[in-house]
Amino acid sequence: MNLSDRDKQYIWHPFTQHQADKGAIAIVRGEGALLFDENGKEYIDAISSWWTNLFGHANPHIAQKIKEQVDVLEHVIFAGFTHQPAVELSEKLIRILPENQSKVFFSDNGSTCVEVALKMAIQFWHNTGIQKKKVIAFKNAYHGDTFGSMSVGARGVFNEPFESFLFDVEFIELPSKENFEQVLQRFTDLIQNKDVAVFIFEPLIQGSAGMLMYEAEYLDQLIKLAQENSVICVADEVMTGFGRTGKNFACDHLQNKPDIFCLSKGITGGFLPLGVTTCTQKIYEAFLSEDAKKTFFHGHSYTGNPLACTAGNASIELLQSSEKLLKDLVVLQKKMSEGLRKNAKVENLRQLGTIVAFDIQTNKGNGYFNDIKSSIYNNFIERGILLRPLGNTVYIMPPYIITLDQLQKVYMEIEEVLNML
Ligand SMILES: Cc1ncc(COP(=O)(O)O)c(C=O)c1O
């Protein structure tokens, strides 16, 4: 039996309706932007394997560093203990994050670093003895699949069975030129009630919502207003961190810096699971007390895993020497996507840094459940391209090291698939 068939016997895959499922493609090897399956077929990973991979599969620098660390220390409890890779990673992160960031808390993935951020913000107010309960988030947001992160995300098919278990959140529209005045007014009304504890957002781009982009100047104004009214601002940079938007962090495009950052995905260059939540000194200090009840009682078994931290250190080293690589990819993405503008099926072509997205014109409306998704996904796969449309939204978010030829092939295949529709 091949791997795909053996997989079917026992494995339940994420975001997969197994009733109609054709089975998983078994990948046996990766190199650069390429993945190779068990039959020798190759695929260009044009979505960086769920937005995690920055410097290519099996990147030799990251792989070597992990190999060295494996023989030294694989893991150690992180309460009461520490180690070189975690210390080094925290120093590196604080150096590249905005200046107001001061402390680093480790967890395991995007959802958990958001949970940590929410719990930190809520307990900050609890520890300070100030009653604040309200949470503000953007409509269509996605922050993960655990209960807290689901609560601050869009309500819909994905979390319908759990809806009555999710906490209340005030959702505001994503700001645009057309609606900003109303958004600002509603935000002001909510905030002036004094009971808003936290405002959480995906800065400049809502990934899972369909790569919806919005302007830095609007977010800047909202953050400013929130901070003037003592609301903790949480930037979920799980997708946008580590160069995706053309700068280290999406918040580097802003004047006003959020109080808490959530980081994951690209943090290890796509090698190992790791979540990080960073915060200001002021937030950290609200947890310092003779009173044990003010402790932040949160931690996972693999918190601060040395191998994951080592991958993080190696990936940040690459990021710091990749300024030109990133700039070139941003320019290439712009140049190549321009060709799509002429295609009558393409709507709302947009770009933020290394990310390009567009909507396919259908008469079924925009959204995740637009059924064009599965047919074009399969079509791309047959052509050796891993693109995973969000409904009728196609996005191209490749590893930064994708070659010119590979990127050209991605765009050529997109054109061909669109022309068949
Ligand atoms: C902005 C954002 N936050 C959080 C998450 C959740 O991350 P994870 O899938 O690692 O739990 C995601 C995942 O796509 C995300 O895009």
Image (cartoon, rainbow, N blue to C red):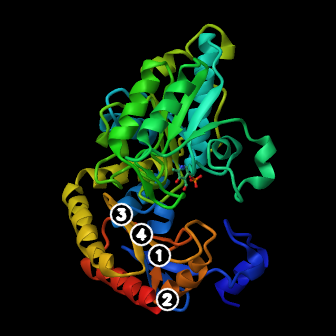
For marks 2 and 1 on the same chain, the one whose residue lies earlier in the sequence? 1
Give me the disc on residue 360: 1
Give the percent coordinates (x, y) of residue 191: 54, 24
Residue 233 appears left or right of 292? left
Q: Which residue is mark 3?
A: 350
Q: As rendered, which of 62 and 346 lies closer to the eye?
A: 346
- Above or below, 218 against 110 in this view is above
Q: Which residue type does callout 1 highlight?
A: Ile
Q: Which residue type does callout 2 highlight?
A: Leu
Name the residue furthest top.
290
**Disc 2 from disc 3: Cα separation:** 21 Å
SS under mark 4: strand
Give me the disc on residue 358: 4
Residues tagged 1 and 4 counted as in contact (Cβ below 8 A): yes
Residues tagged 2 and 4 counted as in contact (Cβ below 8 A): no
Q: Residues within 10 Å of mark 3 (few under 14, many from 20)?
A: some
Q: Which residue type does callout 4 highlight?
A: Phe
For marks 2 and 4 on the same chain, the one whose residue lies earlier in the sequence? 4
Report whether residue 225 is seen. yes
